[in-house]
Image (cartoon, grey):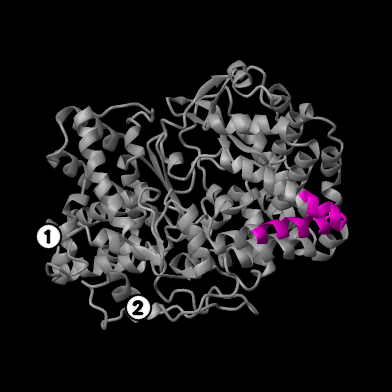
Amino acid sequence: MKGRKLGNGLMGLAILAAGLAHAGEPAGPAILPPAGYLNPKIAACKDFYDHANGGFGATPIPAERSSYGVSEEMDERNWLTQKTILDEAQRSPGSVAGLQRLGTFYASGLDTAAIDKAGLQPLQATLNEIEGIKSASELGKAVGQLHKLGIRPGFVVWVAADDKSSKDNALQLFQGGLGLPERDDYFAKDEAGKKLIAQYREHVQRTLQLAGDATEVAVKAADAVLALETALAAGSKTMVQLRDPEANYHKLTRAELQKLAPEFDWPGYFAAVGVPASEATLLVGQTEFVQTLAKLTKSQPVAAWQAYLRWNVLRSLASYGPQALDDQDFAFYGKVLAGKTAQAPRWKRVLRAVDRALGDDLGRAYVERTFPPAAKKKVVEMIELHKQALRQQVQALTWMGEQSRKEALRKVDTLAAEVGYPEKWRDYATMQLRRDGYLHNVLQGQAFEVRRQLAKLGKPVDKKEWYLAAQTNNAYYDPTTNTIVLTAGILQPPLLDVKASDAINYGGLASTIGHELMHMLDDQGSQYDADGNLRTWWTPQDRAAYDKMTQQVVAQYDAYQALPGVAVRGEQTLGENLADIAGLKMAYLALQLAVPGKKMNDTQAREFFVAFAQSWRSNIRDEWLRVRIRSDFHAPERFRTNGPVAALPEFAKAFGCKPGEPMFAENTRLFLIW
């Protein structure tokens, strides 16, 4: 997944204006036509991002946002469409079950008086159970009961394809349970990092006080939470270490897991969360973390674990609760971490909660209004030309031998594409929703998803299952099914406009079709074969050659400075950078195949590259940029533009770049691995 929510949005035309605006809603910063963002004073060959987007730099970031650009503009338009759906559903739910659910959930979130009146009552039984824990032996069951509600202290569990047996679903356990964005945040040496830790500890304390703890109790509890999370972080793998799929694959029986980490009550956990006894094995991502977690159940006082579990309940659900808790949650996660100065309007925040709980109900209504058959037909055609271009490239590679080439071509040929919306919509009929119970409804949605995940155990993998709702502004590649998924929410103007030129559409979609396509051959995706299994299909010589070339990409991005003294992390962002570079190239080659006579002129080429650069247009707050550098697998937007174009000789030709200029590809030709 390319992480569009973390900065890959694609919107550049003035298409919102009057028609979609709601009475009384702020329109946000003005949206200019693409030419309005060009800055001819900055040469394309010097800094192409600023050349294409310089006119956008003065656009203010709304108070509710940590960044603002194409992705956010697209979100705003998509949300207004969804708001119309939800407004109609709550006023006139009718006889359609999906609309009734949407209206009920949405209305409950807008009723702030009822939310404040209920307070923490919907959570009281859960908080009482935590308070009743008497010994470490009860922690496995307690964690399981929280996981069953979709609250995730300690670690994360889900069900997905077994990486080495891709037709089979497997229970998967992954490190987690931290309140700060990334494990390294707990070990900061600089003053800014130490300040963040202190602000986090204060946030924990304030939250616990708002939940009823006396000051002296909350102070001790906050200290215990921070100490426990720091110990968990010490046992966690780094962002770079998590990028190695082989090193994060451990298939264990339940008996082997108990032997690995005997201090934790695994049988009690599995029973509480609802894992069938017949499920004899599971995949553990990080065995060292599991051992650390288990040992902490014995070495840390029960009171510390009670504070940690209580904190996780409140942290997970604060934004859905009474105003005071909601405000405190925003004070840290919104203001301190992301640099925001104001909460988003209530309707947007409730809409996101509805989306998380009832994504397919909302998606079905959204698709009917926004995604015509002509759009899907266009994208399917474009994907086929991208695959054709990639096939030609693989056949022409000089560094790859025939054995690896044959496997690579099989992977290209068997790649599947899901476009717009899933074939089957999820049925949420088992949810028990209340018009006066927002927190209750959120918990219903979370518990439903846990049950849905566990229901997949013992069944073959459904290759048509989607991990995103159709209205989501994002896309992803799944290596275990060798499938790219492009949602209706991202296939909107100007990213996709059936009335626009092919140059604009291929350029705008380079960071979507091309990018996701090339994830199957990035440094991680290339470790999976055409059947979706994690196995070695390269010859040792070809793999060594490939890995050597990727290290040049690491060095390229390590040299980029996001802020003074804050460098992009080339190893951490390698997979996304490879997909960005190769994805742009495949989009360019696919456009050549689409152009009549298969011959593209320089005007079309420049139009293509400008559309690509403007797809990354964004302004971002320094606070959020620092968080992203530490915790995101994607580089910032500026470098997701300049990095790829600086690697393509075709770009230098189109804009007349000369040797020695920053965007000239002379020194980066070897980055074009594919």
From the viewer's side, name the closer residue of 586 and 647.
647
- Is 601 a magenta residue? no
- Can you tell which quarter of the image residue 550 is in? top left
Task: Answer above or below: position of 415 versus 7.
Answer: above
Q: Which residues are magenta?
A: 198-221
Q: Nearer the viewer, mark 1 or mark 2?
A: 2
Given the image, on which type of amino acid does mark 2 rest?
Gly
Picture coordinates of residue 201 (x, y %)? 70, 56
- Which quadrant of the rendered structure holds the C terminus? top left
Picture coordinates of residue 70 (x, y %)? 44, 68
Q: Is residue 380 left or right of residue 171?
A: left
Picture coordinates of residue 6 (x, y %)? 48, 58
Query: SS of the residue at dot 2?
Result: helix
Q: Identify the residue position indicated by label 1 in the image.
A: 599
- Residue 201 visible in the picture: yes
Q: Which residue is pictured at 73% across the width and 38% down the height?
A: 146
